[in-house]
Image (cartoon, grey):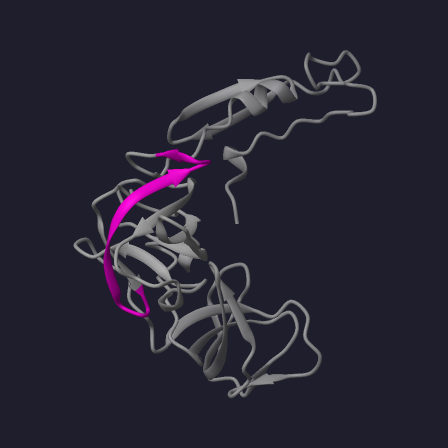
């Protein structure tokens, strides 16, 4: 959920332009919006002020490097170039990276974004980086690059996930094997054990070891990937959880 005190609620009319750029005279009942958050208070009357009050999210540069691969290219005269977006941490030339779950270690020779060399790539940057002594056949979409010397990523033999069934015909039981899309990975994962049903809003347990779940249910499930898969806890690395 969200904290209503930290959200600006602004009545507007896009059709007539009321309360968009300047306060409207047609809603005397509206005294203005106010948000309270740990960074401080903000207040105003119209939409443009509410947009200006949004705080840009901090880039998680202090976390260990995680870069899910979107693709891998072989470029003549350069070599193997994996491509992806930096999700956490910093990628620099000279970094010794490891690709999980294959556990391939190599050095980054150069980093580029939009055909320009970078001294460092930060979260949000879509980059290509040239690696030493690794063939294009050894890497694939869904692998995750990390710093081999700072909490490197690893493959998971199994993991526990919160699953919400939005729409599914019939019941889902242990053994069900859907395809999971997590970051850039696309891998079939088996429901090894449905541990408990939980309330979708509070997260509290409502039933232990249910035989099945159906549309509208939320559950905590132990999943086993059919091929090696790199996942992380949502608390530590949200884009990989």
Q: Main secondary structure of the magenta part?
A: strand
Task: Tell me residue 241's x, y (percent).
Answer: 42, 60
Q: Is residue 114 magenta?
A: yes
**Residue 24 can be seen in this image:** yes
Q: Nearer the viewer, residue 96 or 158?
A: 96
Above or below, 171 against 41 in this view is below
Residue reaching furthest front? 77
Q: Is residue 26 magenta?
A: no
At x 34%, y 63%, the residue is 135
Left or right? Give the position of 110 relative to 167: left
Above or below, 146 against 102 in this view is above
At x 26%, y 49%, the residue is 108
Q: What is the span of residues highlighted in magenta in the rendered image?
A: 100-117
Above or below, 17 against 66 in this view is above
Task: Tell me residue 15's x, y (percent).
Answer: 83, 24
Q: Nearer the viewer, residue 205 or 54?
A: 54
Q: Quadrant of residue 227?
A: bottom left
Task: Tell me residue 65's x, y (percent).
Answer: 29, 50
At x 38%, y 31%, the residue is 38
Task: Tell me residue 130's x, y (percent).
Answer: 33, 49
């Amino acid at each position: 959920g969200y904290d209503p005190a930290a959200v600006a609620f602004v009545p507007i009319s896009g059709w007539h332009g009321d309360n968009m750029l300047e306060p409207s005279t047609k809603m005397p009942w509206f005294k203005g919006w106010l948000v309270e958050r740990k960074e401080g208070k903000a207040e105003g009357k119209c939409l443009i002020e509410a947009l200006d009050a949004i705080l840009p999210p901090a880039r998680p540069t202090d976390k260990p490097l995680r870069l899910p691969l979107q693709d891998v290219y072989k470029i003549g005269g350069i070599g193997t170039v994996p491509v992806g977006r930096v999700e956490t941490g910093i990628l620099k030339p000279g970094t010794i990276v490891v690709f999980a779950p294959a556990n391939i270690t190599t050095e980054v020779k150069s980093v580029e974004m939009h055909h320009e060399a970078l001294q460092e790539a930060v979260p949000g940057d879509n980059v290509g980086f040239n690696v030493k002594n690794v063939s294009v056949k050894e890497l694939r979409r869904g692998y995750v690059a990390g710093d081999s010397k700072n909490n490197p990523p690893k493959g998971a033999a199994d993991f526990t996930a919160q699953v919400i069934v939005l729409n599914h015909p019939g019941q889902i039981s242990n053994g069900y094997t859907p395809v999971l899309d997590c970051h850039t990975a696309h891998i079939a994962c088996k429901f090894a054990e449905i541990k408990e049903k939980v309330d979708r809003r509070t997260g509290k347990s409502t039933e232990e070891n249910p035989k099945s779940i159906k549309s509208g249910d939320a559950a905590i499930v132990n999943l086993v990937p059919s091929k090696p898969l790199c996942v992380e806890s949502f608390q530590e690395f949200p884009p990989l959880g």
